[in-house]
């Protein structure tokens, strides 16, 4: 028996885990996970992985996708309680979005979406106080 021939493929060990998602993949997941079935999203990610690194690269798993989605701490639609609001404000702080919120942005938002004066006052109260608490 001689040396292995070129036709012999390198076989990856089954214990190898797929690589972590890249920043580009994480951005894609965050942008489309609400619009696309998770299985379809996983198939697209794995197709990109195979094109980039070859068909022998271990594919991403559904568990890995679930972990990435839960790490984003997205507030479910319809979460109108205080706990959901706190999570949403905390996520906005981490993403740097809260830094961009000013009194003028809130007022412009109120005009575009025809908010009542009570809704505008609540937005000012919650968002601007959260921003002040961040600066303190």
Image: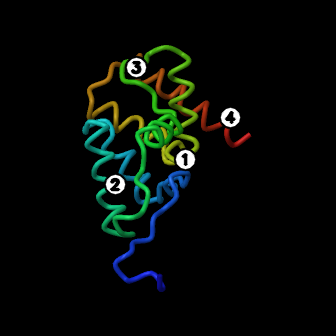
Q: Which of 91/30 is in front? A: 30
Query: Which quadrant of the view contains residue 54?
Result: bottom left
Q: Which mark is residue 99?
A: 1
Residue 21 at x, y percent in the picture: 47, 55
Residue 96 at x, y percent in the picture: 54, 48
**Element assignment for label 2:** helix
Instruction: State which quarter of the image contains the C terminus.
Output: top right
Q: Nearer the viewer, mark 4 or mark 2?
A: 2
Identify the residue shown where x is 47% and y is 59%.
Answer: 22
**Is residue 57 shown above or below 94?**
below
Which tag, 1 or 4, sits closer to the chain's start?
1
Identify the residue shown where x is 26% and y is 35%.
Answer: 112
Which tag, 4 or 3, sits closer to the chain's start?
3
Query: Label 3: which residue?
Result: 119
Query: Label 4: which residue?
Result: 133
Query: Which quadrant of the view contains residue 79?
Result: top left
Q: What's the CA distance linking mark 1 and mark 2?
A: 35 Å
Q: What's the CA distance linking mark 4 and mark 2?
A: 42 Å
Which tag, 1 or 3, sits closer to the chain's start?
1
Which tag, 2 or 3, sits closer to the chain's start?
2
Which tag, 4 or 2, sits closer to the chain's start?
2
The reply, left or right, for residue 85 in relation to residue 33 is right
Disc 2 to disc 3: CB gap under 8 Å:
no
Q: Which of 80/7 is in front? A: 7
Q: Which mark is residue 46?
A: 2
Q: What's the CA distance linking mark 1 and mark 3?
A: 20 Å
Query: Which quadrant of the view contains residue 6?
Result: bottom left
**Is residue 9 shown above or below 62?**
below
């Amino acid at each position: 028996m001689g040396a292995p021939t070129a036709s012999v493929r390198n076989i990856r060990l089954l214990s190898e885990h797929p690589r972590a998602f890249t920043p580009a993949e994480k951005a894609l997941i965050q942008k489309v996970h609400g619009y696309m079935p998770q299985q379809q999203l996983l198939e697209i990610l794995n197709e990109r992985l195979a094109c980039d690194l070859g068909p022998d690269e271990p594919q991403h798993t559904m568990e890995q996708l679930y972990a990435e989605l839960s790490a984003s701490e997205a507030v479910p639609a319809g979460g109108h309680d205080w706990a959901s609001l706190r999570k949403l404000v905390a996520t906005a702080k981490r993403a740097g979005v809260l830094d961009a919120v000013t009194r003028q942005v809130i007022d412009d938002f109120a005009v575009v979406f025809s908010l009542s004066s009570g809704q505008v006052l609540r937005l000012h109260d919650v968002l601007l106080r959260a921003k002040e608490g961040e600066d303190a």
